[in-house]
Amino acid sequence: MGSLDRSLIAGLSVFEGMAAADLDRIVGQARSMRIAKDQPVFEQEQDAHSFFLLLDGHVRVVKSTPDGQDVTVRYISPGELLGIAHALGRTTYPANAIAAADCVVLAWPSQLWPTFAANFPSFTANTYKSVGARLQDAHTRVIEMSTEQVEQRVAHALLKLVKQSGRKTEEGILIDFPISRQDIAEMTGTTLHTVSRLLSAWEDQGLVKSGRQKVTVVEPHRLLLVAEGRVEKG
Amino acid sequence: MGSLDRSLIAGLSVFEGMAAADLDRIVGQARSMRIAKDQPVFEQEQDAHSFFLLLDGHVRVVKSTPDGQDVTVRYISPGELLGIAHALGRTTYPANAIAAADCVVLAWPSQLWPTFAANFPSFTANTYKSVGARLQDAHTRVIEMSTEQVEQRVAHALLKLVKQSGRKTEEGILIDFPISRQDIAEMTGTTLHTVSRLLSAWEDQGLVKSGRQKVTVVEPHRLLLVAEGRVEKG
DNA sequence: GATCTTCTTTGCGCTGAGGCAAAGTCTGTT
DNA sequence: AACAGACTTTGCCTCAGCGCAAAGAAGATC
């Protein structure tokens, strides 16, 4: 596996406040893996043997319902942990994690977690801080689903993706990995048809430009107005 | 405040696996408080000065949207922690916690959290385990909101309340604290009108009995069928 | 026991958004 | 360059569930 060194992880928020020697000790126990687009990082119900850090690429976390519908729980960007089931007292993964683009991850055996927790208090604290943020996000999601119309939810979802993985282009801000209408529908609790209609309408108004598995937000400010429901239908 | 002793908390799952002496040390630093029905335990945005353990009663955790709608995040039963913002890296409470019935809580200053985390590893692990369960619940909630009809969601909500706070009576299982149609609506992302209509229909079919701020589930099994969408409308 | 307040029920009309169906478009492959 | 497969667009119809409105209980208060 060759030379993993701390430069891979130094500077990431989960490792904030840690000594270089500790980073070395942590990286030293990791295994680096490449995961091709559309391949799983881990799967729902599977024994949670490892936890991961995404170094490059994008991962989609999806839960499948008994009757076969998929709901996207979150998208993961480089620098974030995933699969930390053991840190939350679970022994299996609660969802499927699928590479939304080619990825590079670091993997640690889950049994290292207790040791890490005991020896690297700021790593632990940072990790739980990010768990707190996820819980927060999940609640925000519930609130959006409870109180907003589909149009607002889709707008919010795009803005979140843009913030998290936006890349500036001359046309606007591009969501920097392939994402289909269906994917957006699974994030917002609607159908690909409705998402398609919304994107078409927004394109007519000059808010976004979109194509096959590709969305560019042209006017984030106006899209935010839509997200906040402060725009009447035209 | 008098004599708090470990018998108050021994046996609760968050304190599982802890020595009696440690329980004493923990309880010794707590303050016990009574909170009357409809009074706040803590409020959204407020500085998270303390974290709490509910000893008796029921607490409703509610988030308010900017435009004044309320969404209930969860109901808390005796034995559960609440307000552990600091353990998740936050300095303010993320929501309002309101006594749904008269309550007794223990309170610890938040600044004790790091000490507890360092000195009582199994308490810490148990706490994060319960956070994991909450995250799980929140995701389940998102999935329900995404894939189920209102009828199923309300049925699921009632079953969850029954499981969590049900008391057997001769008529069925009573949800053991006052809960209005509005409260149920805020848990399920619908309106009190729709909840009222559903309860009326279910009452006609003999699934539940309900009254002012009171719901009794008469036939949990049949209600579960409704929750799972395996029943056609009659 | 009369009044007030809060909670609940129910009727009616409307509409946002889903289901179905079919056609269009893009990409990679042979 | 034609084909296959995957993704997207759009039209039309339908209906679950919301908004509005008004009336009906059940407690609470004095």
Image: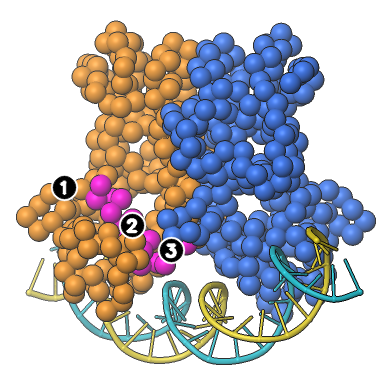
Chain colours: A orange, B blue, C cyan, D yellow
Q: Chain of mark 1?
A: A
Q: Which residue is mark 3?
A: A148
CA distance separating discs 1 and 2: 17 Å
Q: Nearer the viewer, residue D13 or A145?
A: A145
Q: Chain of mark 3?
A: A
The C terminus of chain A appears in which quarter of the rendering? bottom left
Q: Which residue is mark 2?
A: A156
The type of residue carrying mark 3 is Glu
CA distance separating discs 3 and 2: 10 Å
Residue A3 sits above or below residue A170 on the image: above
Q: Position of residue A183 (x, y in %)?
A: 35, 58
Same chain check for tags 1 and 3: yes
- The quarter of the picture where residue B171 lies is bottom right
Dot 3: few (<14), some (14–19), or many (≥20) neighbours within 10 Å?
some
Q: Nearer the viewer, residue B203 or A215?
A: B203
Q: Residue at x 82, y 54 (%)?
A: B174
Q: Position of residue B32 (x, y in %)?
A: 70, 26
Is residue B220 in view from this perspective?
Answer: yes
* Label 2 residue SS: helix
Residue A36 sits above or below residue B156 on the image: above
Q: Residue at x 30, y 27 (%)?
A: A13
* Image side of residue A98 versus residue A142, left or right: left
The magenta segment: A147-163
* Label 1 residue SS: strand
Q: Position of residue D20 (x, y in %)?
A: 53, 81
